[in-house]
Amino acid sequence: MTVAVFFGCTFIAFGPAISLFLFTIARDPLRVIFLIAGAFFWLVSLLLSSLVWFITVQVSNKNSATQQRGLLIFGVVLSVLLQETFRYGYYRLLKKANEGLLALSQEDTMPISMRQLAYVSGLGFGFMSGAFSVVNILSDSLGPGTVGIHGDPQHYFISSAFMTLAIILLHMFWGVVFFEACERQRWWALGAVVISHLIVSCLTFVNPHYQGSLIPTYIILSIMAAWAYLCAGGSLRNLKLCLTCKDKDFLLANHRPR
């Protein structure tokens, strides 16, 4: 049973993201490089926030439960702010890199657009965030032990997997909205991304009342997905044509001779 839980939760958490990587990124070496770089930027932001949190814990009163909880909340907020700061830094770096690639390219167009970079970098942030969020939980799911045997909630593993899935997809959508906001200098949109990120992160404090964290998180996920779709140039008409397989340009672009 533990093996089934392990693989089930792994596929729930990373299945959609891995599928997106295989179908949209893996064939393009440039996209793979930018995805790995995005994951590295997220990792550096986590390192800095962890270092600050560790120092504050060491100098605080470890016997005070209230103070330790306050420091935990401080660590979460600091981590979110650093992640978004590094996302902006990565955007600036990619902007310069894209200009350099255009100068070296023999074509008049950029080898990869900013919207594609936003999607790829967001997925890189999500992959690394999801890995650090759930890897220890997946390790524990292999046993020994049984969750809920002492009356605790029995949905710990699957709830963690669905939360990880939401975080990965949210990072992807946040990346698209964030980059578009930077391109158009819509600072209110940047603020909306940061605030929604803070809300989702703080919702985890509601656990183990998982319905109190998962439901609002997936509502925010739906809103950000629609927003990112519009930022990427989508419309209701395009969505209808795609779902009904009547988008001729899309079908021709994805046609492969046999």
Image (spheres, rainbow, N blue to C red):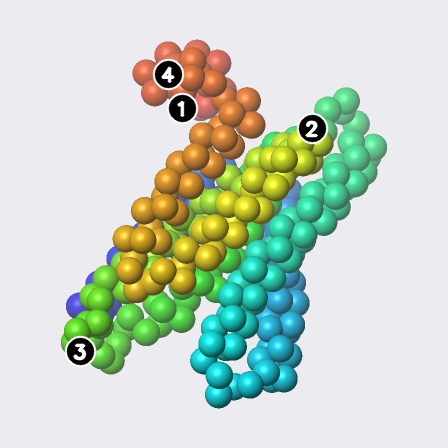
Q: In this view, does 73 lie to the left or right of 36?
A: left
Q: Is mark 3 on a helix, strand or loop?
A: loop
User: x and y percent of residue 31 in the render?
Assistant: 60, 42
Q: Nearer the viewer, mark 2 or mark 1?
A: 2
Residue 240, labelled with which disc? 4
Residue type at the position of mark 2: Arg
Residue at 65% from the left image edge and 72% from the top image edge:
52
Residue type at the position of mark 3: His
Which residue is identified by label 2?
184
Q: Quadrant of the N terminus?
A: bottom left
Nearest the eye: 27 or 210:
210
Res. 40 visible in picture: no
| First in residue order: circle 2 vs circle 4 | 2
CA distance separating discs 1 and 4: 28 Å
Residue at 35% from the left image edge and 72% from the top image edge:
139
Q: Are marks 2 and 4 in contact (CB under 8 Å)?
A: no
Q: Is residue 36 left or right of residue 250?
A: right
Badge 4 crowding class, 10 Å Cα cut-off, few under 14, some 14 to 19, many 20 or more, is few
Res. 107 visible in picture: yes
Badge 1 crowding class, 10 Å Cα cut-off, few under 14, some 14 to 19, many 20 or more, is few
Which residue is identified by label 1?
258
Residue 201, labelled with which disc? none
CA distance separating discs 2 and 1: 42 Å
| First in residue order: circle 2 vs circle 1 | 2
| First in residue order: circle 1 vs circle 4 | 4
User: x and y percent of residue 237 in the render?
Assistant: 43, 13
CA distance separating discs 3 and 1: 59 Å
